[in-house]
Image (tube, grey):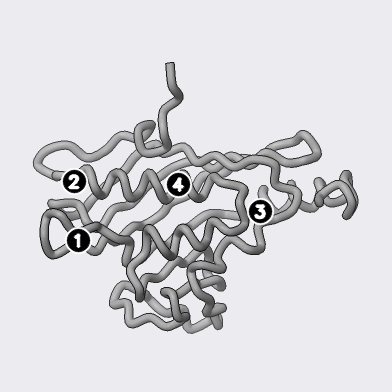
């Protein structure tokens, strides 16, 4: 039996909320790319998933904006206490931690406030396997705002994605892996 994708694992909204299959495929593809160890996978985010002016906010101080680094996104809520790094979405995966051996997102529950569901919140768990043989997992919440194609045949794209998590366990695990492996073991 084939393993389920991240999107297939989760519980999606039921009637009267309608989640278009294209939205499900888009979110599933997002997590499939996220779970890839390929440092060029950010280019796939930019080229396949996000609108030209899309925003990908991975944590409070790291914001990736569109293909040209600029955004006019109405969904972003600026944080007056931080100066986010403004980078293209295509560069979002260039600095994956070198101690990472594997990544896997598992979705538990998906909620939507509208129908058809174009503003979706995902609750899940993120597992990271480390090159020192250890692993770390932590809960996350992510919001996906989907830009719907003007016609049925047009693609749906991500306009805005924001991820919330407490990185404390992840930071501690990476530090331990760095100590165990040394610089040579992480390359």
Task: Give how far apart the Cα atoms at labels 3 and 1 are.
Answer: 36 Å
Specify which label sits upstream in the sequence, 1 or 2: 2
Task: Give how far apart the Cα atoms at labels 4 and 2 are.
Answer: 17 Å
Q: Residue at x 19, y 59 (%)?
A: 154
Say which residue label 2 marks. Answer: 20
Q: Relative to the observer, which residue lies in front, 103 or 167?
A: 103
Residue 17: image location, x then y, percent: 14, 45
Residue 10: image location, x then y, percent: 35, 35
* Label 4 Cα crowd, 10 Å radius (few <14 / some 14-19 / many 20+): some
Say which residue label 1 marks. Answer: 148
* Label 1 Cα crowd, 10 Å radius (few <14 / some 14-19 / many 20+): some
Question: Are the residues flagged by discs 1 and 4 in contact, CB closer than 8 Å?
Answer: no
Say which residue label 3 marks. Answer: 168
Question: Are the residues flagged by discs 1 and 2 in contact, CB closer than 8 Å?
Answer: yes
Element under disc 3? helix
Count the numbered circles shown. 4
Task: Give how far apart the Cα atoms at labels 3 and 2 are.
Answer: 35 Å
Q: Residue at x 67, y 38 (%)?
A: 129
Specify which label sits upstream in the sequence, 3 or 2: 2
Using residue 18 as the reference point, say whether residue 178 is left or right of it. Answer: right
Say which residue label 4 marks. Answer: 31
Specify which label sits upstream in the sequence, 1 or 4: 4
Q: Give the position of the N terminus as an image quadrant.
A: top left
Specify which label sits upstream in the sequence, 3 or 1: 1
Task: Give how far apart the Cα atoms at labels 1 and 2 are.
Answer: 10 Å
């Amino acid at each position: 039996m084939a393993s389920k994708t991240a999107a297939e694992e989760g519980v999606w909204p039921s009637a009267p909320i309608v989640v278009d299959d294209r939205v499900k495929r888009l979110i599933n593809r997002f997590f499939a790319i996220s779970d890839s160890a390929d440092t060029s996978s950010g280019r796939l985010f930019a080229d396949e998933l996000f609108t030209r002016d899309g925003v990908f906010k991975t944590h409070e101080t790291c914001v990736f904006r569109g293909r040209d680094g600029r955004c006019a996104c109405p969904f972003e809520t600026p944080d007056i206490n931080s100066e986010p790094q403004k980078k293209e979405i295509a560069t979002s995966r260039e600095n994956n931690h070198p101690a990472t051996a594997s990544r896997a997102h598992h979705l538990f529950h998906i909620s939507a406030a509208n129908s058809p569901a174009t503003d979706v919140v995902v609750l899940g768990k993120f597992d990271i396997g480390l090159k020192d043989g250890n692993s770390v997992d932590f809960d996350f919440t992510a919001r996906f705002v989907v830009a719907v194609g003007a016609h049925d045949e047009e693609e749906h794209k991500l306009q805005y994605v924001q991820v919330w998590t407490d990185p404390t366990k992840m930071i501690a695990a990476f530090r331990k892996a760095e100590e165990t492996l040394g610089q040579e073991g992480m390359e």
